[in-house]
Amino acid sequence: QVQLVESGGGLVQPGGSLRLSCAASGFTFSSYAMSWYRQAPGKERELVAVITSGESTNYADSVKGRFTVSRDNAKNTMYLQMNSLKPEDTAVYYCQWVGYRRTYWGQGTQVTVSS
C-alpha cells in the first residue's frame, strides 16, 4: 500500500534551518510529481512546493528564495530544505502524492519557529 512518512520537524529559532524528509513507498516514486503542503493553526492547508518527475520545481511566493525542494529517487525520498525560517512558517508540514485516482497524505511533521 502507499505510505508517505515525513520526518525532520522540530523547534527552531527564527533565522534557523531545518530539513524535512518524506519517505515514500507503494508506487513508482521516480515517475511522479510530489508536493509539500503545510497547515498552520486555524488556517487552511496550503501548497508550499512541488517537484516533478523531471525535477522541475515550483514554490509558494511566501517561501521562494528560502525553501528548496529536492528528491532522491534511489531512496524514494523527497526533501524540503528550509532556511531563514520565520515564525509564520510554523505549521504541520505534509507531503502529498496524487495517483491511483486519489490523493495520499503523510501524517505530517510539526515545525515550530520561535525564540
Image (tube, rainbow, N blue to C red):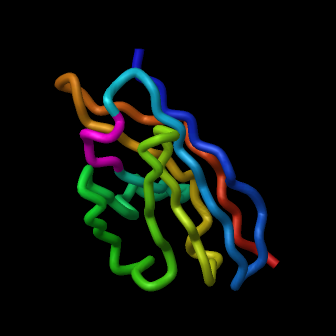
Locate residue 15, reporting x and y percent.
70, 85
* In-front residue for pair 42/54: 54
Horizontal relation, residue 66 to residue 10: left or right: left
Q: Residue furthest left?
A: 101
Locate residue 32, reporting x and y percent.
26, 42
Q: Residue at x 78, y 77 (%)?
A: 13
Locate residue 43, reporting x and y percent.
45, 58
Quadrant location, the N terminus = top left
Q: Residue at x 45, y 45 (%)?
A: 95
Tally of numbered tags: 0
Decide whether residue 69 is among the magenta residues: no
Q: Which segment did they paint magenta?
A: 29-34
Q: Residue at x 32, y 59 (%)?
A: 50
Q: Residue at x 57, y 52 (%)?
A: 92
Q: Residue furthest front?
A: 74
Compared to residue 29, the image places residue 91 above or below, namely below
Horizontal relation, residue 24 to residue 111: left or right: left
Quadrant location, the C terminus = bottom right
Compared to residue 89, the image places residue 45 above or below, namely above
Horizontal relation, residue 21 to residue 72: left or right: right
Locate residue 82, reporting x and y percent.
58, 71
Compared to residue 17, the image places residue 50 above or below, namely above
Compared to residue 84, the image places residue 12 above or below, namely above
Quarter residue 10 falls in: bottom right
